[in-house]
Image (cartoon, rainbow, N blue to C red):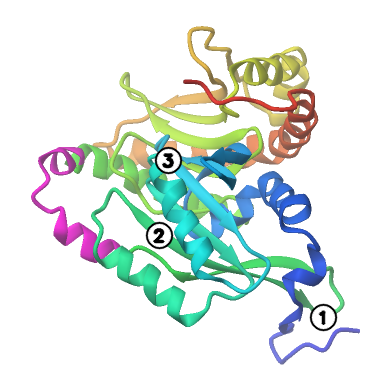
Amino acid sequence: MDELDSKNLGRLRRIADARSVWTSESGDFTPWLAENIDVLADALGMSLIVVDTEVRIGDFRLDIHAKDGNDRSVIIENQLERTDHGHLGQCLVYASGLDASTIIWVAPNVREEFRSALDWLNERTDSELGFFGVEVGIVQIGNGPPAPVFDVVSRPNDWQKTVKTAGNAAEARASTPVNAARQALFTDILTDANTRQSAISVPTPGKGNWIAFASGPFGNWVLTVVPDGRLRVEAYIDTYNGDLNKALFDEFAADADSWETQVGLDLSWERLDDKRASRIAAYRHVDLDDPADRDAARQWAVNALVAMYNTLNTPQRAAAKVRRAEYADPAPPP
């Protein structure tokens, strides 16, 4: 039996080096990370959707090209060996080649001089660009199964960047009281949902009428207050390949009645033929100025989100993995 303390808590132990689990960076670790990008996204407090892997940039190949919840370009460079100057330089080449807003460097150990370099870059760039240094390891509690863990050792200094861009008019317009009220509602919903389903993350609030979270190979989950005043909970299907998105949506829509029975809700099946993405959603009106209605909407959204996530997330992930293999080399839209 596992040894527990007086509160029946086990001890988290690092049991292996990443290189003993993933023997090859390009053939083993990168494909695994692309399929499980939500693990890294949760550690960073952001939403990530993989666009492509092994992307050629000049004479180099970027490990993973992704997009964040605001549709901005993200590059992820992996190393299973000792961090070096060459990979730092490649990160900058990839960032310029793909006009990236976020650069993520993953390695078992980020040497102190490179962590300092990432911190220096974060201090001297504006809010449109951020650098993350992330260490990957393998942990275990007692005799339970091993699990990956990502430790963020360098990240953008949001407070410093907010000060630097305080005079930016566009950013100031985005931070309206209405948007602040929406984001506060989203945070309350996600905090409550997280207590019932720990895989539902609570990301940093944004400045718009929506928030993306709990990403996966099919896309991500999203909360939105749409212009007509309805609160929307949705599985947003977007792999950055329009044909793949529609194939995934059609697969689930074909069994809409069965899925709705399992979820316990009437769902809105929105193929969005004029767009690249599709969505599976549930709606309820919300009055942000009425505390009683806001609280009722919050409770409804928590129940809807947990039910939809528990029913649809795993099947969508599995279906996306199968269909991605059918689209051997999906190309992002121009």
Q: Earlier in the sequence, mark 2 or mark 1?
A: 2
Residue 208 in view in this figure: yes
| Label 1 sits on residue | 142
Q: Earlier in the sequence, mark 1 or mark 3?
A: 3
Tell me the element at label 1: loop
- Magenta stretch: residue 239 in it? no
Question: Above or below — where is 29 with respect to 31?
Answer: below
Q: Amino acid at mark 1?
A: Gly
Q: Which residues are magenta?
A: 157-174
Is residue 199 at least partly visible in the picture?
no
- As for residue 160 lying within the magenta part, the answer is yes
Residue 233 in the image: state x and y as whole percent.
51, 32
Residue placed under numbered mark 2 in the picture: 131
Question: On the image, numbered disc 3 is attached to which residue?
Answer: 97
Going by the image, does 279 lie left or right of 160?
Answer: right
Q: Find the distance from the CA under tag 2 to the CA under tag 3.
A: 16 Å
Task: Give me the C-alpha separation between circle 1 and circle 3.
Answer: 45 Å
Q: Residues within 10 Å of mark 1 (few under 14, many from 20)?
A: some
The nearer-to-camera label among 2 and 3 is 3
Q: Amino acid at mark 3?
A: Gly
User: Residue 253 in the image: x percent, y percent?
Assistant: 70, 15
Residue plotted at (35% across, 71% down): 119
**In this view of the protein, which residue sits in the foreground, 160 or 178?**
160
* Sequence-first tag of 2 and 3: 3
Q: In which quadrant of the rendered image does the N terminus lie?
A: bottom right
Image point (44%, 80%), residue name: 113
Horizontal and vertical percent position of residue 21: 81, 66
